[in-house]
C-alpha cells in the first residue's frame, strides 16, 4: 500500500495534488488542520499492470451527439460519447452496477441537501415491500428536522429508527444487525472541502465498515459536480446515486460526476417513497438525455 501525506493551504488544493500523485483510486485516511492550512493522508494500492501504448495515429475527434448538446457536458467527455449510438457510448464510458446493499451496511453520503434522507426512506420502503425489514439508522443529527423526517417514514413502515450521534454509537447500532439483514445509514451532510467535515465522515465510515454511496442532486454545474465527486471518491465512495432527475433539464453534472470514477446505481426521479427510485442502465440514461429531462 502506498501512503502519501499532503500539506496545502486549502482542502481543494490538497485533493488536487493527491489525485495527481495517487490517482482516482486513492482513499483518504485522515485529515487535520495545521497552522498553514490542512494536512491530508491518503493511501493507494499499487498498480502492477503495465501501461501499453498502441501504435498508430491519434484517435480522430468524434462529433458530439445532438442529444448531448444542451446538457453542458465537459467537451472532452462529450467527444468521448460520439461516433456510436448513444446507449452503446454510455455503456462503454460508464459503469452501471447494483447498489452495494447486501454484504455491508449501505452508507448514504453527500453534500447537505442532496436528498440522502428521502433516498434512505425509499430504500427502506423497497426492502419492507419485498418482505425484508432493514436496520435503519440516521447519523444526521445536525440538520434541523432530518431525524424527525426519517422517523416519520419509519413509523409508517413499522420500523424502529436508530439515532447515532457519534461513530461509536453508529458501530453499536450496526452491531445489532441480524445475519443477512440489510442496513441503511443516513450519514450527516458533508462539505468535502472542509477538513472538519471530512474527518467526521471518515470516522463514521470507518466505524460502520460499510459501503459509502455518493448521493448527488442533478442540475449542478458540470465542473462543480465533477470536483465534488472526485472529493467523495477520495473519501471512499465508488458508486453514485443521482437525485432530482425529475426536476433537472440538463444532466451534464450527473455524467461529469460519474466520470470521476463512480458507478451509476439508481436514480431518484420524484418524491414518492414507494416508487420514485429506479435502477439505471445505459438505455434508460440515453432516453433521459434525449428527452432533455430526468423523469
Image (spheres, rainbow, N blue to C red):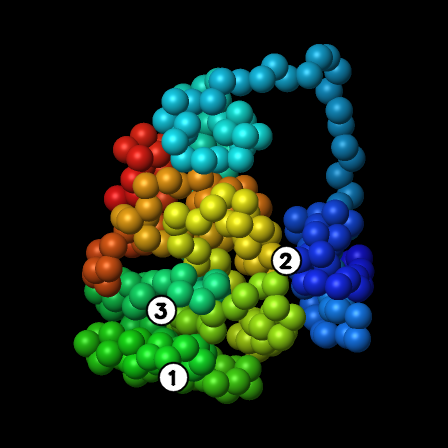
Task: Compare residues 63 and 104 and report the one nearer the observer.
Answer: 63
The residue depicted at 68 percent of the width and 62 percent of the height is 11
Q: Residues within 10 Å of mark 3 (few under 14, many from 20)?
A: many
Q: Position of residue 160 (x, y in %)?
A: 30, 83
Q: Nearer the viewer, residue 227 or 284?
A: 227
> Quick check: marks 3 and 1 in contact, CB under 8 Å?
no
Q: Quadrant of residue 285?
A: top left
Q: Could you tell me which secondary element the residue under label 1 belongs to?
A: strand
Place of residue 115 in the rendered image (x, y in percent of width and height, measured from the top left): 37, 63
Q: Quick one: label 3 or label 1, which is nearer the N terminus?
A: 3
Decide if residue 168 is in sight here.
yes
Rendered residue at 19%/76% (across/down): 156
- The percent position of residue 33, horizontal first and vertical second, equals 72, 74
Mark 1: few/some/many CA within 10 Å (<14, 14-19, 20+)? some
Residue at mark 1: 162
Query: Dot 2, crowdedness within 10 Å: few (<14), some or many (≥20)?
Result: many
Q: Earlier in the sequence, mark 2 or mark 1?
A: 1
In the rendering, which numbered label is found on residue 234? 2
Residue for point 49% across, 18% down: 63
Instruction: Report which quarter residue 118 is drawn in.
Output: bottom left
Give the alpha-carbon distance from disc 3 to disc 1, as whole Å.
14 Å
Q: Which residue is mark 3?
A: 117
Nearer the N terminus, badge 2 or badge 3? 3
Amino acid at each position: 500500500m502506498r501512503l502519501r501525506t499532503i500539506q496545502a493551504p486549502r482542502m481543494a488544493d490538497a485533493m488536487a495534488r493527491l489525485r495527481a500523485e495517487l490517482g482516482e483510486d486513492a482513499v483518504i485516511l485522515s485529515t487535520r488542520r495545521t497552522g498553514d492550512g490542512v494536512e491530508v493522508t491518503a493511501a493507494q494500492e499499487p498498480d502492477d499492470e503495465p501501461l501499453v501504448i498502441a501504435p498508430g495515429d491519434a484517435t480522430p475527434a468524434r462529433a458530439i451527439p445532438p442529444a448531448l448538446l444542451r446538457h453542458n457536458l465537459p467537451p472532452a467527455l462529450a467527444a468521448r460519447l460520439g461516433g456510436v449510438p448513444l446507449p452503446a457510448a454510455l455503456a462503454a464510458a460508464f459503469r452501471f452496477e447494483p447498489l452495494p446493499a447486501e454484504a455491508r451496511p449501505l452508507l448514504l453520503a453527500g453534500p447537505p441537501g442532496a436528498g440522502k434522507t428521502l433516498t434512505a426512506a425509499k430504500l427502506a420502503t423497497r426492502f419492507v415491500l419485498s418482505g425484508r425489514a432493514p436496520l435503519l439508522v440516521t447519523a444526521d443529527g445536525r440538520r434541523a428536522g432530518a431525524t424527525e423526517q426519517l422517523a416519520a417514514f419509519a413509523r409508517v413502515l413499522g420500523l424502529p429508527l436508530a439515532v447515532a450521534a457519534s461513530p461509536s454509537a453508529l458501530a453499536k447500532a450496526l452491531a445489532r444487525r441480524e445475519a443477512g439483514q440489510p442496513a441503511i445509514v443516513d450519514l450527516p451532510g458533508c462539505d468535502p472541502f472542509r477538513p472538519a467535515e471530512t474527518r467526521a465522515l471518515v470516522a463514521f465510515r470507518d466505524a460502520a465498515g460499510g459501503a459509502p454511496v455518493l448521493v448527488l442532486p442533478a442540475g449542478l454545474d458540470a465542473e462543480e459536480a465533477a470536483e465534488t465527486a472526485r472529493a467523495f471518491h477520495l473519501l471512499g465512495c465508488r458508486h453514485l446515486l443521482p437525485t432530482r432527475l425529475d426536476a433537472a433539464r440538463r444532466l451534464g453534472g450527473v455524467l461529469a460526476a460519474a466520470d470521476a470514477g463512480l458507478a451509476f446505481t439508481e436514480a431518484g426521479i420524484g418524491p414518492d417513497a414507494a416508487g420514485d427510485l429506479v435502477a439505471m442502465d445505459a438505455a434508460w440514461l440515453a432516453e433521459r438525455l434525449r428527452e432533455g429531462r430526468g423523469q
